[in-house]
Image (cartoon, grey):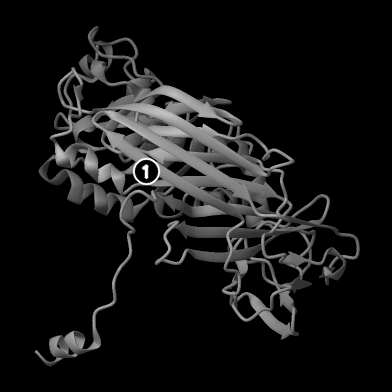
Amino acid sequence: MRLRAVWIIAVNKEVSLPLFSRQFSTVETCCKSMFGDEYVGIPPDESFVKALHTEVGLIDAGTFVESRDRCNKPALYPTLEVSLKENKSLWPVVVLENHGLMYCAMPLIPQEMVTQQDKSDISVADLPGISMAVEALTGLIQCVSLTASMTSLTPALTLKLHQFVNTCMPFGSVMCSNPALMSQLINPLGKAKAKQPLWNPVLHKGKSQVVIHVKEEVRCMQFNHSEVRDAIDVYGSVICKSEVEGTVPEICTTLVQPGGNGGLTVNPAVSSVEYTTTTSRLRFRPCNNQPLCHYTLPHLTEAPIYGAYRLRLNNSLATLCMQLQLRAGIKNNFQQLEVQFPFPGLQVSIVRPSPSVGSVSVQSGSTLVWNIGSKFPTKSLGATLNAVCKLRRKTECSSEQQIDGGDVNGWEQYINSCALVLFKIADYTYSGTRVDPQSIVVSTAPKVRCSVTSECVSSQFKVWNSEGEVPVVADMPVQELQNLLIK
């Protein structure tokens, strides 16, 4: 949402010009193309001040003005409809009064709202441009202290208002109206010669800290099939968040990867990398939570959790069995640990759930969810779910139609289904990748609190039904491929 113009007008009928005014030609051009023949332009400052004084009763207060005094005119404060010549009007004009001055703004509103004859059906709260204009005017009021006794502004006050408008609403688009933030953007503190980055234009004041976070994701496809090998991908990223006084610091840290760093890809923000067999020394300037580097670990071929899934359908009844086994050596402390069994297009109701641990529920009507808890049983490190579910097809009618055995497309397609294993482990990575806290060095600040966090999460961790077909893609024979290329 954008503003067409802003004004500061004295509540004094003897003053015919605004103390301050600013129109945005780019927004006005957009308004012309939007409204076409119904476009009403913003009049000159003197004409607008006279029309606004008439609307608020400073002029012709003792006479009846139909556009202002008619009894069926809706009151939509803080917006006013300012009447102009030739039966034209400007709406909405947002007006806020403070210390004898009227702060006005005109937002760009969709055409159907502006041209609507009966504005009593319009809710001002439903127009985002109104709240945006109020926010901008509130910041303008707090930007410079003005009083009603002023008939004109000094060059210093005018310059300050223009600086605020240029920073707060460039080209009419309200970006930020916080006076404290605006003052720092207009007049930055400190004598540092280094330029601040675009993503962090305000200097940080407070306790200095650097937080490095390692996020590792495990993607897996388990088939439980003798002729198809399971697939697993382990990849991760390193993110740095820096809040340090002064200019953006230069940070050095060491990334430790026990399995080797062959799959490391660094961000352009990293100025230099020093490699050894199992470590990578990174030198960088942090850039607004953007990943410093990404890594992949192709040497990991075993999943942290092994799953076996069996699903059988008999008419409208689905019998499923899910077995999970945690691999030895994996941290048995989860922030999230659940299994989802999606049945898209069907309505699921549980008949007989029998989990060895945790609870079973139905979410969104078509997904069976097994919430295991925060850990596997300590002795066995395994969990089992046996359940019988009743399936119904979702129809457009209010009634639900059961699936019968003769409808092949109704239920046999769900034989080739999978279960999604969702887990999250804090302060842990499956590959052992970590950042050495003792290696973090911040160049511009001697006292910085440095901390390292990590997490391991699942990403598309699927266990396919062993009773169904294995979803694999067969490679095209070389001869057939060559024939296609020749054609």
Quadrant into which the N terminus falls = top left
Query: In front: 437, or 12?
Result: 437
Residue of label 1: 1
Query: Residue furthest toward the top?
Result: 71
Quadrant into which the C terminus falls = bottom left
Q: Is residue 53 left or right of residue 396?
A: right
On the image, the x and y values in percent for residue 54 come to 33, 23
Query: Residue furthest toward the bottom?
Result: 486
Relative to 117, is 156 above or below?
Answer: below
Q: Is residue 163 left or right of residue 231?
A: right
Tell me the kind of residue under disc 1: Met
Q: Few, some or many C-alpha atoms within 10 Å of disc 1 (few <14, some 14-19, many ≥20)?
A: some
Relative to 200, is 256 above or below?
Answer: below
Query: Residue furthest toward the right?
Result: 446
Residue 373's quadrant in the figure?
Answer: top right
Residue 143 visible to the viewer:
no
On the image, the x and y values in percent for residue 181 come to 64, 47
Query: In front: 429, or 96?
Result: 429
Residue 56's quadrant in the figure?
Answer: top left
Q: Is residue 78 left or right of residue 379?
A: left
Residue 197's quadrant in the figure?
Answer: bottom right
Query: In front: 415, or 219?
Result: 415
Q: Residue at x 35, y 42 (%)?
A: 45
